[in-house]
């Protein structure tokens, strides 16, 4: 027979059983008839001939049974029978089925949601051609920008593109921001300046128009730009003729030559790309990112060595200071995702704990149900069912329950992913918009669900078929499985221990957030609204023009009704950027080694507007302007570190490396230190007056600070109108209250805390359900014992204490194991904690109290039922 005919034959035996049985019956009957005729031909009577044929054949019914037992894929038939029986059984116990399915749905749903994010963010390739061949190159001193920066100096960028042989193509780029005018209201957007081969290197073709060409990144070339699909839709109304039109970026006119394909926002959240024009400046080193596509057959080690050789051949740049640079070549994907890898690993670990708790809960529910079905199992065994057959039936039921839970868990995962997108701050999870529930995720959810059902259903099933199965039929409901009672208790302990670990992690994060909110920032954020501006160098090329703009803005802001005070600062506290460096002290006073300070530029009245206390001396005034002797104000830590035991007022410092007579600045005041960034540490700061600022880059970015009178409504709209009156081409940025700015700063931390808190509450709910189920069944199982105790004089209070005592015993052991687990696992949170140790005793104590409280709450109803048992009724039922 051909393979096709064999397959058809076996499939008929599975799905066309009635006709196949009829064919077998006809075949056997024909065989008996032929044997009977042969016996008649030998001289036997008809009845004797048939009897002899049947004896020779050996039993028709037995032969039919043998045929059925050897039928192909017999196990598949049995599985079908088990599934049908399991469905009927679960229909008769809808409460158990609903709780079990929901338990698995919660565990699998949470796991699948996080797996979806991990799969799309960490495992799915970047949306570029042969993305695994894309690498970022770096040649920087160790520890540069905290050791996290990747990039090369401008001159190495040019030299490497000329001399390298390891990469099929390379391109330098630099993140940037642009102020767009000429197509609607002025807007500040993220973008990048990129090399001419940037898009071809990524293997990405514009949806409209073309990519950049060589020569457009040369000095003097015409200004061209490529816009994102998002910007094309929102700002240009999806105009198909947008290519060739112009747009103003930072005051310069650019011609749009292309529209990027949907979804392309690299690097980070870019909406516009312009050519990167590298011109070497003797006074400053430009650090750019260098992206390369590794050539065929070239190893990373060879490429890294070549980068180091070319870097060394250029010699040490006289503009560079510090230790020599080292070469590194890093996969682009790891760079894109490295900021979130540890967070996702922690979230993954958290949902695994939730899944384990859900699995243990399912095991407990199955064990309780198996205990209630002892008589049924004993009856099936007495009718001939083998231990293996009963075990298979029980595992089929658990797999069916978990499969249904997995299907429901997919819906939970869909909601979880949507919630994740809604609460995740911008940039917290890269590629988050690419995250979606697809076929692999659905397969993962169902596989995890079924595997969970089988694994956690195995122990209850084995426990149910242990020992003499028919003993339950002989003794009926009086059979009390002490081993099952102990096993149920161990399951509860496991749930509480796992929940303790998760709850402890969430408690540490909540404690850290509480510490952050209590930090003394050094200023008063109440009733303060901020607004930032970036002034383009084409429109405001000189420091004098910049000062005139800021002076005009401050005057207009001060005239808004309800404003108490106004000020301006180049880099506000709790912002993302800043300028810092060293300085020189006049005289012989030495600076502490490696001592650096923040160097913001402020306006007169800034300290009053921000609520920063002046400790000594005076504030800046309008008289401290260009052409007058330079003055500065220092923070208290600068005064304490540089002039200990002395007044800093009147001392002189300089911001230049080799100060001349006109480069010295006089300290006129001392103010409190303030928290400047998300590290929540107070910084040493030297403030300069914007009226005396000479380099334009010190004041081309400025944040205005407005403090309103008590009870005054929002002034954000009035501030925006004031800016429009001064220059409508300048967009308002970061227009929000200072309190909102602080919340934005900790948004990532709040996001992490929210997720861990959600997982821990889910674990706590599952643990409470498991504890309640075990205690409720224990009380039901021991009803006769409780009735006897009460008939012999036991009071309801004693019975109540008995149930509560068992609860506390289970919770105590679970907490003890959970403490050991938390001591080993919460250390991975160290980098996310603020002001709290991973072994914080208060957090451990608080978590233990919460878990005991939840366990006692779960025990209340079973304990109350136990104390209300009527001994007469309990004994009559037996």
Image: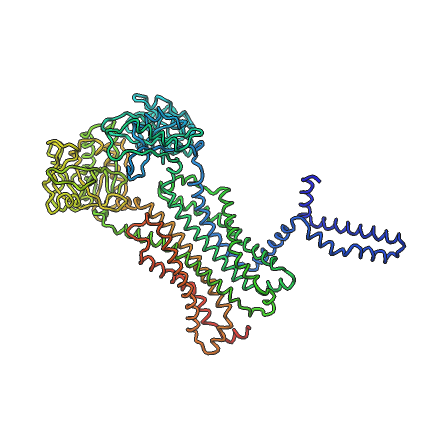
Left or right relative to 277: residue 478:
right
Question: Whole-percent x and y of residue 836?
Answer: 30, 53
> Looking at the figure, which quarter contains the N terminus?
top right
Along the viewing direction, whichever of 88 and 53 lies nearer the viewer: 53
At 71% from the left and 50% from the top, the residue drawn is: 18
The quadrant where residue 65 appears = bottom right
The quadrant where residue 321 appears = top left
The quadrant where residue 740 appears = top left
Numbered-mark total:
0
Along the viewing direction, whichever of 54 and 682 lies nearer the viewer: 54
At 53% from the left and 68% from the top, the residue drawn is: 480
Residue 609 sits above or below residue 691 on the image: below
Left or right relative to 181: residue 788:
right
Residue 354 seen in this snapshot? yes
Residue 303 sits above or below residue 356 on the image: above
Along the viewing direction, whichever of 821 and 598 lies nearer the viewer: 821
Question: Whole-percent x and y of residue 791?
Answer: 48, 77
Question: Whole-percent x and y of residue 179?
Answer: 30, 31
Which color scheme did the rendering employ for the protein?
rainbow
Along the viewing direction, whichever of 737 and 46 lies nearer the viewer: 46
Residue 500 sits above or below residue 638 on the image: below
Tell which residue pokes out farthest to the bottom in this image: 792
Residue 185 seen in this snapshot? no
> Looking at the figure, which quarter contains the C terminus?
bottom right
Question: Whole-percent x and y of residue 73?
Answer: 65, 49
């Amino acid at each position: 027979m051909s393979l096709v005919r064999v397959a058809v034959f076996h499939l008929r035996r599975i799905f066309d059983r009635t006709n196949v049985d009829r064919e077998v019956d006809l075949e056997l009957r024909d065989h008996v008839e032929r044997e009977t005729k042969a016996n008649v031909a030998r001289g036997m009577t008809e009845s004797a001939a048939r009897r002899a044929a049947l004896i020779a054949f050996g039993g028709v019914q037995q032969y039919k049974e043998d045929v059925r037992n050897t039928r192909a894929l017999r196990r598949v038939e049995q599985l079908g029978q088990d599934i049908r029986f399991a469905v009927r059984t679960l229909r008769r116990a809808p409460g158990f089925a609903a709780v079990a399915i929901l338990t698995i749905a919660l565990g699998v749903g949470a796991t699948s949601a996080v797996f979806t994010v991990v799969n799309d963010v960490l495992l799915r390739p970047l949306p570029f051609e042969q993305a695994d061949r894309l690498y970022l190159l770096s040649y920087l001193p160790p520890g540069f920008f905290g050791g996290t920066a990747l990039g090369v100096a401008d001159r190495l960028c040019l030299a490497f593109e000329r001399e390298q042989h390891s990469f099929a193509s390379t391109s330098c780029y630099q993140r940037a921001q642009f102020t767009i005018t000429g197509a609607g209201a002025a807007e500040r957007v993220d973008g990048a300046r990129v090399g001419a081969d940037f898009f071809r290197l990524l293997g990405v073709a514009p949806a409209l128009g073309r990519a950049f060409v060589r020569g457009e990144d040369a000095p003097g070339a015409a200004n061209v730009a490529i816009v994102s699909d998002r910007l094309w839709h929102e700002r240009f109304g999806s105009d198909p003729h947008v290519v060739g039109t112009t747009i103003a970026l930072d005051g310069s006119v650019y011609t749009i030559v292309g529209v990027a394909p949907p979804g392309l926002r690299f690097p980070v959240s870019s909406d516009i790309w312009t050519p990167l024009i590298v011109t070497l400046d003797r006074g400053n080193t430009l650090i750019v990112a260098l992206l390369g596509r590794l050539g065929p057959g070239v190893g990373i080690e060879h490429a890294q060595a070549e980068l180091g050789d070319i870097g060394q051949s250029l010699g040490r740049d006289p503009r560079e200071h510090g230790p020599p640079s080292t070469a590194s070549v890093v996969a682009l994907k790891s760079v894109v995702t490295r900021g979130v890898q540890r967070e996702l690993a922690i979230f993954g670990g958290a949902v695994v704990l939730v899944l384990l708790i859900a699995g243990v809960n399912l095991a407990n529910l199955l064990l309780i149900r198996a205990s209630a079905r002892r008589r049924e199992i004993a009856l099936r065994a007495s009718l001939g069912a083998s231990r293996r057959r009963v075990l298979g039936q029980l595992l089929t039921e658990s797999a069916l329950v978990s499969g249904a839970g997995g299907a429901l868990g997919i819906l939970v995962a869909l909601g979880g992913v949507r919630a994740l997108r809604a609460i995740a701050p911008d940039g917290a999870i890269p590629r988050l918009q690419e995250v979606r529930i697809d076929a692999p995720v659905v397969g993962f959810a169902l596989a995890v669900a079924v595997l969970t059902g089988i694994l956690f259903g195995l122990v209850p099933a084995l426990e149910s078929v242990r020992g003499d199965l028919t003993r339950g039929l002989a003794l009926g409901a009086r059979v009390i499985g002490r081993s099952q009672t102990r096993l149920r208790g161990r399951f509860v302990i496991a749930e509480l221990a796992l929940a303790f670990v998760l709850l402890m992690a969430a408690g540490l994060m909540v404690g850290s957030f509480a510490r952050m909110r209590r930090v003394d920032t050094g200023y008063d954020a109440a009733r303060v609204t901020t607004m930032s501006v970036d002034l383009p160098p084409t429109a405001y090329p000189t420091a004098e023009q910049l000062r005139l703009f800021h002076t005009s803005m401050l005057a207009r802001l001060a005239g808004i009704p309800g404003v108490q005070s106004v000020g301006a600062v180049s880099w506000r506290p709790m912002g993302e950027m800043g300028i810092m460096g060293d300085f020189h002290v006049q005289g012989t006073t030495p600076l502490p080694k490696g001592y650096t300070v923040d160097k913001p530029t402020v306006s007169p009245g800034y300290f009053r507007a921000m609520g920063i206390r002046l400790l000594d001396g005076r504030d800046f005034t309008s008289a401290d302007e260009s052409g007058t002797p330079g003055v500065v104000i220092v923070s208290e830590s600068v005064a304490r570190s540089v002039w200990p035991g002395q007044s800093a007022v009147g001392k002189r410092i300089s911001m230049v490396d080799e100060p001349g007579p006109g480069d010295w600045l006089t300290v006129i005041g001392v103010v409190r230190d303030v928290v400047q960034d998300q590290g929540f540490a107070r910084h040493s700061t030297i403030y300069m007056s914007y009226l005396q600022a000479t380099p334009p880059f010190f004041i081309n970015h400025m944040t205005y600070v407005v403090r309103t009178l008590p009870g005054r409504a929002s002034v954000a709209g009035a501030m925006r109108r004031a800016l429009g009156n001064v220059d409508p081409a300048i967009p308002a940025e970061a227009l929000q209250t200072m309190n909102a700015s602080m919340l934005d700063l900790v948004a990532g931390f709040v996001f992490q805390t929210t997720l861990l808190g959600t997982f821990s509450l889910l674990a706590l709910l599952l643990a409470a359900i498991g504890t309640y189920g075990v205690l409720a069944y224990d009380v039901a199982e021991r009803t006769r014992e409780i009735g006897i105790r009460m008939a012999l004089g036991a009071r309801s209070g004693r019975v109540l204490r008995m149930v509560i005592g068992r609860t506390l015993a289970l919770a105590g052991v679970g907490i003890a194991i959970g403490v050991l687990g938390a001591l080993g696992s919460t250390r991975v949170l160290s980098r996310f904690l603020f002001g709290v140790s991973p072994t914080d005793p208060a957090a451990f104590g608080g978590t233990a109290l919460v878990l005991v409280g939840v366990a006692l709450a779960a025990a209340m109803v079973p304990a109350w039922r136990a104390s209300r048992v009527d001994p007469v009724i309990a004994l009559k039922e037996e």
